[in-house]
């Protein structure tokens, strides 16, 4: 399993350090409510949300915390491609098979403490899957198995999926790609999430130009 992620390939790089800073902010940034389940999404396609979440998951695992990365983008799943593994079974298998609740079909990644749950075969109506009581049960099962459970989800403006799943977890992060994401789309996404009281933790800026900084 060969994985091309900056936090694995170049762990001492400025980009990898930025993901570790994000991890630290998430772990200790909120005193009033603990954070153990998190959705990462974007406003539209091609904002880099899936790769960003995979890198963030690596940093949680590298800090010694058991972490599960769930591909809940049931429209265009990609975590199985990022991790070069099979995409069958996974979350959708847990939806339909009671025995999978007791023994989730998690895939061990090359990173210690990090397991991945692929999306499986995309359903006809993803929103119905993510809003179901069964999804609540799956979240509870995964929380019992890891310190942190991170969900990749479809873009906010493409479907109701992220808003529905975001209402079930501790918080949501919105990926914004520099030079690509439209400002009005960010505003619309924020309004859609706040309308159903999703806890929007903030945004993650990707593809930002590198600044010249001194090496420590």
Image (cartoon, rainbow, N blue to C red):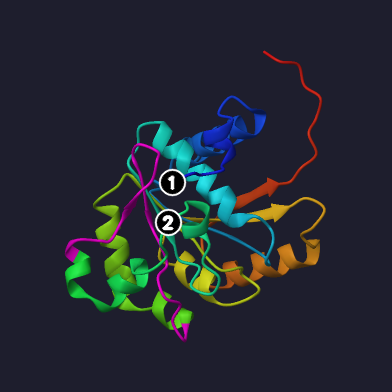
Q: Residue furthest bottom?
A: 124
Query: Tag 1's secondary structure?
Result: loop
Relative depth, front residue between 100 and 182: 100
**Relative to residue 214, is residue 177 depicted above or below?**
below
Of the numbered discs in the image, which one, if any, rests on residue 1?
1
- Is the residue marked by circle 2 packed among few (<14), some (14-19), or many (20+) residues within 10 Å? some
- Residue 203 position, x and y percent, is 64, 51
Q: Is residue 131 visible?
A: no
Going by the image, does 40 lie left or right of 179? left
Q: Is the C-beta separation of discs 2 and 1 under 8 Å? A: yes
Q: Tell me the SS state at disc 2.
A: loop
Q: Quadrant of residue 15?
A: top right
Mark 2–mark 1 Cα distance, whole angstroms, equals 7 Å
Reading the image, the residue beneath label 2 is 85
* Along the line of sight, the residue nearer the viewer: 92 or 83: 83
Q: Is residue 61 magenta?
A: no
Q: Which residues are magenta?
A: 102-125
Residue 105 included in the magenta stretch of the image: yes
């Amino acid at each position: 399993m060969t994985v091309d992620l900056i936090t694995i390939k170049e762990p001492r790089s400025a980009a990898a350090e930025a993901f570790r800073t994000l991890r630290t902010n998430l772990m200790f940034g909120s005193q009033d409510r603990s954070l153990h389940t998190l959705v990462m999404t974007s406003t539209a396609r091609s904002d880099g949300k899936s790769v960003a979440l995979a890198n963030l998951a690596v940093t949680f695992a590298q800090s010694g915390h058991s972490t599960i990365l769930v591909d809940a983008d049931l429209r265009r799943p990609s975590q199985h491609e990022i991790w070069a593994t099979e995409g069958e079974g996974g979350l959708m298998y847990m939806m339909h098979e009671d025995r999978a609740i007791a023994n989730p079909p998690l895939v061990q990644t090359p990173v210690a403490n990090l397991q991945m749950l692929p999306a499986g075969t995309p359903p006809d109506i993803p929103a119905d899957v993510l809003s179901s009581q069964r999804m609540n049960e799956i979240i509870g099962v995964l929380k019992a198995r890891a310190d942190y459970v991170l969900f990749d989800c479809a873009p906010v403006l493409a479907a109701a999926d992220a808003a529905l799943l975001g209402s079930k977890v501790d918080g949501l992060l919105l990926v914004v790609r520099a030079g690509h994401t439209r400002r009005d789309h960010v505003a619309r996404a924020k309004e859609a999430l706040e309308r159903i009281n999703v806890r929007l933790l903030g945004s993650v800026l990707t593809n930002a130009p590198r600044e010249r900084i001194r090496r420590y």
